[in-house]
Amino acid sequence: MTPPTFRPPVPPAARLDSIDLLRGLVMVLMALDHSRDFFHAGALRGVDPLDLTQTTPALFLTRWITHYCAPTFILLAGLGAFLSTGRGKSPRELSWFLLTRGAWLVVLEWTLVQWAGWNFAFDLHHHNGAVLWAIGWSMITLAALIHLPVRIVTAFGLLLIVGHNALDSIRAENLGAWGRLWQILHQGGPVRFGSGHVLYAAYPLVPWIGVMAAGYGLGAWLQSAPDKRRRRLLTLGAALTVGFVVLRFSNLYGNARLWSPQSMPWQTVAAFLDCTKYPPSLCYLLMTLGPALLLLAAWDAGAPRALRPLLAFGRVPMFFYLLHLPLLHGLAVAAAFAAQGRADWLYGNGRSAAPADAGYGLAGVYLAWAVGIAVLYPVCRRFAAYKQGRRAAWLSYF
């Protein structure tokens, strides 16, 4: 009788600092955008920082640079889902985790994030369909997709990313009873249901599901030697970036708004870069994911020393997200009481108009951002250290 062959257990895949570093960077940039939401005088009065008739170069760039946050984070979430299979998760375990974590994120969006983060008030009739909502439903969808071959999951994701703009001409108002579902999946905007309930679908699901599925496929594609992995990241990142420039310049497809030369050079550049985020156009995704992959390639050999503090945020991104909104919102309320003696315009979903002297310029926004990051850094660092080496299931949900 032939003795059984001994197969040593496969060691878990090493955690890549480059992924945590990039994730930490986009979390910090996201906090900048939310600092602007709460502190900037223009934001309190509904000024669109991307509107060339209202903005300045500094304000435009402050808003535009944060476009990299959602696409990069969702791509990395899909990539991380695949990499978790190399850390001992079976397909069944991964599917259950994605299903339950996705549902948890949707619940968080509609409760803690909405009430304690954005509104500082309970509101059972208005519901945000923002970034956690999109990530949650993308995870729920990926929970089903991972039972298919990886190439099918990847192809599905790429089809949604590349093809969804071909559906832009389909409008919810022409679909009757199916119109609300179309708003949630593709068109976006306020979706009314029940007695006085409104879901604002800021992040229509179809493109984001595609980004997460593509990230899952990217994880499989990067299971190679470090040198080969870096070449692949560099090649793909460069191809996506060049693809954005060519497609955007052509004005043929991939963005709801066409660009055209403006009266000032910086405005021409801004018009070229102002790609549609809600929902994310093909140009928008190429513009953001291409450079993100280039950064992954650059950092794959190791995190630059000056940027290593970002790892503290990138290793606990959900913890950071849940803390930063109430912190920044609370700082804005405290600043308003100190300056105006009231802060009613910072409470509730339907807020009152801000007084003429409320809010600050960009210097105040950047100061508030720096204070928020400084407060959160030691907290996130300690929580990351607490998570390391612990196997408690609940920790994987934060």
Image: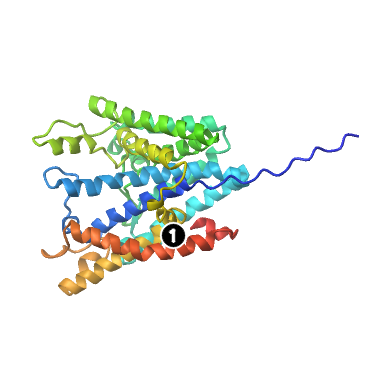
Work out whether residue 124 can be spotted: no
Residue 387 against residue 214 in the figure, above or below: below
Q: Tell me the crowding category of disc 1: few under 14, some 14 to 19, or many 20 or more residues within 10 angstroms, Cα based.
A: some
Rendered image quadrant of residue 338: bottom left
Here the colouring is: rainbow
Residue at the far right in the pictured view: 1
Where does residue 140 sit, x and y in percent of width and height?
A: 49, 46
- Relative depth, front residue between 373 and 306: 306
Residue at left offset 13%, top offset 31%: 261
Where does residue 234 sit, x and y in percent of width and height?
A: 41, 32
Question: For mark 1, what is the residue?
Answer: 319
- Relative depth, front residue between 222 and 121: 222
Residue at left offset 35%, top offset 47%: 69
Image side of residue 134 versus residue 54, left or right: right
Image side of residue 54 versus residue 306, left or right: left
- Amino acid type of the residue tagged 1 in the rendering: Phe
Residue at the far front in the pictured view: 305
Label 1, secondary structure: give it. Answer: helix
- Relative depth, front residue between 332 and 183: 332
Work out whether residue 34 can be spotted: yes
- Relative depth, front residue between 195 and 64: 64
